[in-house]
Amino acid sequence: MIEVDLPYPHAYLWPNRRPATKQAASARVSQHRTWAFHATMADPAWRSFVPGASVPVHIIVSRKAAGVYPDRDNTVAAAKAYLDGIADRLGFNDRLFAAPTVEFIPLINGRFLFQIGGAPR
């Protein structure tokens, strides 16, 4: 299993938010995809990762200090750029990812922790 720790996605990546311009949203998507690509390398297990027919994905969400927890569907949508970057680093198409499961934890630090390819903790 690989664990990738990333910051809370920018507001433009959430489905109910409207970006100022399409270019601004595109820039944020690209930025988040790059972050995920590089953060995947922090877990040494990425080098030996071999995807199966379906790769399980579990997202653990620690909300920001202000605000409530988002709903699960919006969380998965906001994480799309991150999942693309992780799949890029692992060398396969993100279509191999199974439907992500989402868990909310009480810790308040505004982080998304992705567990790829293993049973959730």
Image (cartoon, rainbow, N blue to C red):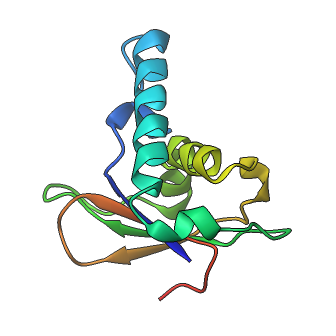
> Which residue: 26% across, 61% down?
68
**Residue 40: x and y, percent?**
47, 56
> In the shown orientation, is residue 82 left or right of residue 20?
right
> Which residue: 40% across, 30% down?
31
Judge whether 37 appears above or below 105 on screen: above
Residue 19, visible in the rendered structure? yes
> Which residue: 47% across, 89% down?
121
User: Could you say which is closer to the camera, residue 20 or residue 39?
Assistant: 39
Q: Residue furthest left?
A: 65
User: Could you say which is closer to the camera, residue 106 or residue 91?
Assistant: 91
User: Could you say which is closer to the camera, residue 104 or residue 43?
Assistant: 43
> Which residue: 63% across, 54% down?
90
> In the shown orientation, is residue 100 left or right of residue 106?
right
> In the shown orientation, is residue 12 left or right of residue 80?
left
Residue 17, visible in the rendered structure? no
**Residue 65: x and y, percent?**
13, 59
**Residue 2: x and y, percent?**
52, 71
Judge whether 54 appears above or below 35 on screen: below
User: Could you say which is closer to the camera, residue 119 or residue 109?
Assistant: 119
Based on the displayed image, in which of its 4 quarters is residue 1 positioned?
bottom right
**Residue 64: x and y, percent?**
20, 57
Figure disc tally: 0
